[in-house]
Image (cartoon, helix red, strand yellow):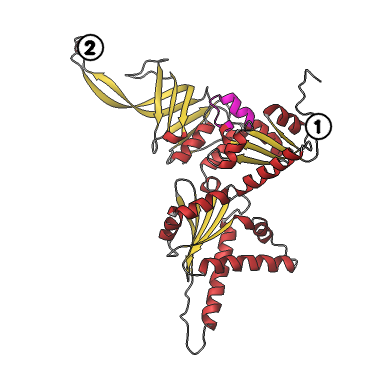
Amino acid sequence: MLVKNQIKDKDKNVSVTFVPQDSEDLWYLYNLLSVGDTVQVLTYRNVKKGNQGQIQKGKSKMEKVLLKLKLVLEDIDYIASDEGMRLSGKSMEPHEYVPLNSYHTAEVELNKDITITKENWDQYDKSILQDLCSVEKKADIGAVILEEGVAHICYVTESMTVLQAKVEKSIPRKNSAYGTRDLDKAMNTFLTMVSETMIRNFDFSRLKVILIAGPGFVAKSLYDKIMQDCTTAQNTGGNNKAYSEILKNKSKFLVTHSSTGYLQGLEEVLSDPATRKKLSDTKFSSESAILQKFHQALNDDDGRAWYGLEEVTKAIHLNAVRYLMVTDTLFRSDDIATRKSYIALTEQAKQLGAEVFVFSSLHESGIQLDQLTGIAALLKYPVPDLDDSDEDD
């Protein structure tokens, strides 16, 4: 969570203060921090209390004191599974209990301020800031939980669910005289309202899963309504970009059952092992499909599939890359310069029009890619001999 951000294009030595609220925030901070940055954190220290005479005689008392340390970063220790981060460096400001230029290690704790000062905030830093401070950027699942007359549109991250919108409409009961006419009309209007609210709130190209859940057939009815509207718009020559975007990402939809259309229904769905397996497979379906294409080209040995940093770098410089595949382990390198070099390489590929896929090392597709050096490319056209060294040339 961002507390203060006044960064402008040409600002230098600007301080930004955060309050990390979950493990995902720590991951973004880890990507943001670099050796040489200045950080200010709150931390506890055991200090000796008493006058000089008591301290010399060993009669002083040890007390835990909350301090504000200002350090120049020399080391960043982050282990995602521990959900913790330790920062080490030399103190920049003298304190009653902290001498100037003394070496300290401090824990970055959830719900406590951390202030970062950089000599220069580059474009990558700013993009991390944007993601860190926006749940829309952090979420990879969009969820709609609904029942007749009420729907909840949410973003779901690894650690939280954020309600974006709620849609309500009065639905009449089935009338014996008029059958289901009024009911069908009201439900059609309700589903249209939900569909339009989804379009306003969801970026279908960025989200990895669009989950729709509800009791009975209501979730399937919403999905059918969305697809019908998209197909109709396409067939009539409508120029609605949202509808074409939905059709392009049709495979991301996952329709399932919940006992209620309220948020408890989402908790129920996300805790179901079978649904979680489907979510995992759907989230990484794009990556799996691209990796499958890569393996096919590699087996065909047609000069379009290459892996390894040197080979992929050459292909990028030739502007020959259609799909660039990188595992997130490369962005988590203990060596900051190495991590940033991979980031720069992916940014260069994007600027040249390549589609970049970052594979999770927690999924089978990411494990497979890690076994192929962690970086690979599927080219637009065959390029032979990329593995020839410069010395051979």
| Residue type at numbered disc 1 | Pro
Q: Which residue is mark 1?
A: 384
Type of residue at label 2? Gln
Q: Quadrant of residue 63?
A: top left
For disc 2, the marked residue is 52
Going by the picture, which residue comes out furthest to the front?
299
Q: Residue at x 51, y 51 (%)?
A: 277
The image shows residue 223 at horizontal and vertical percentages of 58, 65
- The correct choice, above or below, for 48 with respect to 157 in the image is above
**109 to the left or right of 50:** right
Counting other residues with Cα less than 10 Å from the Cα at mark 2, is it few (<14), some (14-19), or many (20 or more)?
few
Residue 151 visible, this orientation: no
- The x and y percentages for residue 31 are 54, 33
Looking at this view, is 105 or 326 the one in front?
Answer: 326
Work out whether residue 200 or residue 314 is closer to the camera in this orientation and state it: 314
Alpha carbon separation for disc pair 1 and 2:
76 Å
Q: Which residues are magenta?
A: 330-342
